[in-house]
Image (spheres, coloured by chain):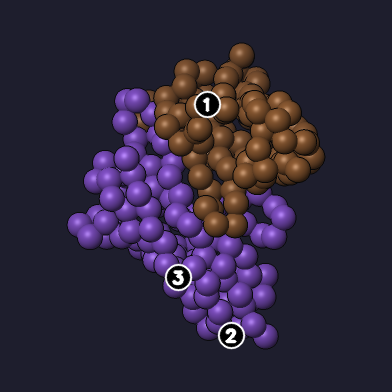
Chain colours: A brown, B purple
Amino acid sequence: DARVTQTPRHKVTEMGQEVTMRCQPILGHNTVFWYRQTMMQGLELLAYFRNRAPLDDSGMPKDRFSAEMPDATLATLKIQPSEPRDSAVYFCASGLVLGGARTEAFFGQGTRLTVV
Amino acid sequence: GENVEQHPSTLSVQEGDSAVIKCTYSDSASNYFPWYKQELGKRPQLIIDIRSNVGEKKDQRIAVTLNKTAKHFSLHITETQPEDSAVYFCAASPFTGGGNKLTFGTGTQLKVEL
């Protein structure tokens, strides 16, 4: 049963600390999305990658957030330094785009981040 | 960039009634419109999608309609059941050579009352 795997599932950290969230996309998928979900903002796109190249990170506060794909099996989202307003659920999703065909975006279970 | 608006933000219906959720999009290049259902504490999951070359698609009790001219699409759920209670998100995505950015609406909290 192929699925997107995110770690950790929950993270509580103190303000100012670095936070790293990890995502393992479904094997063979070439598109990865990072979304942030809060009650007020719904599903907010932070960044997305195709074939490991960042295509759009305009939704991400670049002074503290960074997103990378070191290889095809790992995507990371880092926050440094973290702030209480970063508290949210962070979802990773992956999909496959090939020529004119595409699959749906499959979501991971999310990382619930609390910054105190 | 793409902007997706979704209405209503909350919707309460009686079991057995129909529910309709509406979305509008701004980018005429968008050609793929999925709908996701998110139950409390869980991940969003695709329930139905439609591409711009068709105007309507059905899957049992759910259907989606698309009006490309007006740039709006809607989700219809008939014979609602308590297990339909969840947050529903619409989304829009272009398919271009550069990628397939997926932009979501703000969600609709659907409550099906007994």
Q: Quadrant of the N terminus of chain B?
A: top left
The x, y position of residue A33, in whole percent, is: 53, 34
Amino acid type, residue under disc 1 in the picture: Asp
Up-down: is B112 above or below A21? below
Amino acid type, residue under disc 2 in the picture: Gln
Q: Quadrant of residue A5?
A: top right
Q: Which chain's residue wears label 2?
A: B
Q: Is residue B20 left or right of residue A110?
A: left
Q: CA distance from mark 2 to mark 1?
A: 47 Å
For residue B8, the mark is 3
Q: Residues within 10 Å of mark 1 (few under 14, many from 20)?
A: few
Q: Which residue is mark 1?
A: A63
Q: Nearer the viewer, mark 2 or mark 3?
A: 3
Q: Which chain's residue wears label 3?
A: B
The x, y position of residue A54, in whole percent, is: 47, 22
Q: Residue at x 31, y 31 (%)?
A: B96
User: Quick one: which residue is furthest to the front in this view?
Assistant: A16
The x, y position of residue B6, in whole percent, is: 42, 62
Q: Is residue B42 left or right of residue B59?
A: right
Q: CA distance from mark 1 to mark 3?
A: 35 Å
Q: Considering only order in the chain, which callout, 3 or 2, is on the residue closer to the N terminus? A: 3
Q: Residues within 10 Å of mark 3 (few under 14, many from 20)?
A: some
Q: Residue at x 56, y 79 (%)?
A: B12
Q: Secondary structure at mark 2?
A: strand
Q: Which chain's residue wears label 1?
A: A
Up-down: is A89 above or below B90? above
Asked if one can make out residue A19 in the rendered structure from this viewpoint, the answer is no
Q: Which residue is mark 2?
A: B14
Q: Secondary structure at mark 1?
A: loop
Amino acid type, residue under disc 3 in the picture: Pro
Q: Residue at x 65, y 21 (%)?
A: A74
